[in-house]
Structures are given as structure tokens and as C-alpha cells.
Amino acid sequence: VVAEPFASWILSGDFPAGRPAWEDAGAQFVADLEPFENRKLWLFNGAHTMLAYSGRLRGHETVADALEDPVCRRAVAEFWDEAARHLTLPELDVPSYRAALLERFANPRIATISPRSPRTARSSCACGACRSCGRNERRAGPAGPRPG
């Protein structure tokens, strides 16, 4: 069986009858899943969607090809920088997660094909990345002047 090396198993809950030692296989148990879910939606799903669609617009066939494009890569880095402002718990380890995602997205053996249909774009965004970032921006209040 061919499998990619990337894995991120974040689990929570009570197991009154006991459970397997999933942490031995790399699972992480946390009290609150929401910050980890947001990390996954914003950094993984959001960046993957951004690479897929911006890559297609720039003539790339795969997410790995789009990641090699400096324009697409810069857009992802800027998106991640913005999302990271809301991912502040140290245990989220955003820098390591970003590095792992770059490695995953660059893997040509995964060969994720960039979508061709605008309808698919709308359904992919339903993953919550855009909606979630917008919700947090509203919660944070109006933006002040940006430095630089």
C-alpha cells in the first residue's frame, strides 16, 4: 500500500471502557479540538484550495506545480501569516505544521489535480477555511492600519 508520510491525528474525548494506545502511532490527545480544527481548516484546507485554484488560473496542473510558482507560494505564505494571528496556542506548533504542509503539498507523487470547474471551487470553500477566517476577523473587530 502506498501512503504519504504526512499524518495529523488529533483526538479528544472520554473513553470509559479504555482505548488503544493511539498515541504510540502518533495521535495527539487534546482537551479542546476547536483550535486544532481551525489549524487544519485554515492552514491545510485553505492553502490547498488556494494552491489548486490559483495554480489552475496560472496554468498549473497540480498543487505541487502551483507550489513551485513564486506567486502562488507567496499567496499561501501571506494567507498562513494572517491565519497564524488567530492560532496562538503553543501546542498548535504552527511553524512545524506549515513546514510539514509545504512538504506534503510539494510531493509530486500525490499529484492532486487542480480543479477545472468554478462550481467545484464554491463547494471546496465550504470546507470552512474562508468562512472561519471571516468569523474570527469579525470577532476581532475592525482592522487598523497595516504596518509596512
Image (cartoon, helix red, strand yellow):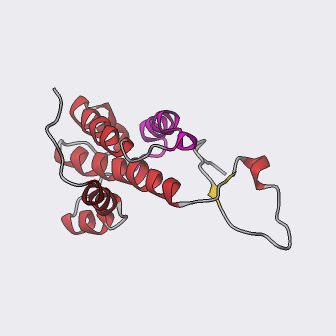
**Image position, residue 103 (x, y; %):** 48, 34
> Is 114 situated above or below 146?
below
Q: Position of residue 143 (x, y in %)?
A: 18, 47
Front residue of this view, candidates 10 and 138: 138
Quadrant where the C terminus sits is top left
Extreme-top residue of the structure? 148
Q: Residue at x 18, y 52 (%)?
A: 142
Name the outermost residue toward the bottom.
17
Q: Is residue 10 above or below residue 43?
A: below
Q: Is residue 45 left or right of residue 74?
A: right
Asked which quadrant contains residue 122, the reply is bottom left
Write down the quadrant of residue 81 in the picture.
Answer: top left
How many tags in the picture? 0
**Between residues 27 and 103, which one lies in front from this camera angle?**
27
Question: Residue 25 appears at what percent x and percent y?
Answer: 75, 48
Q: Is residue 101 magenta?
A: yes
Is 103 magenta? The answer is: yes
Q: Outermost residue, right direction?
A: 17
Identify the residue shown where x is 27% and y is 37%. Answer: 78
Q: Provide residue 5's location: percent of width, then percent of height.
A: 60, 41
Q: Magenta: predominant secondary structure element?
A: helix
Please give left or right for residue 10 compared with residue 19 in the image.
Answer: left
Q: Residue at x 46, y 40 (%)?
A: 101
Question: What residue range appears in magenta?
Answer: 89-112
- In the depicted structure, whether residue 122 falls above or below residue 57: below
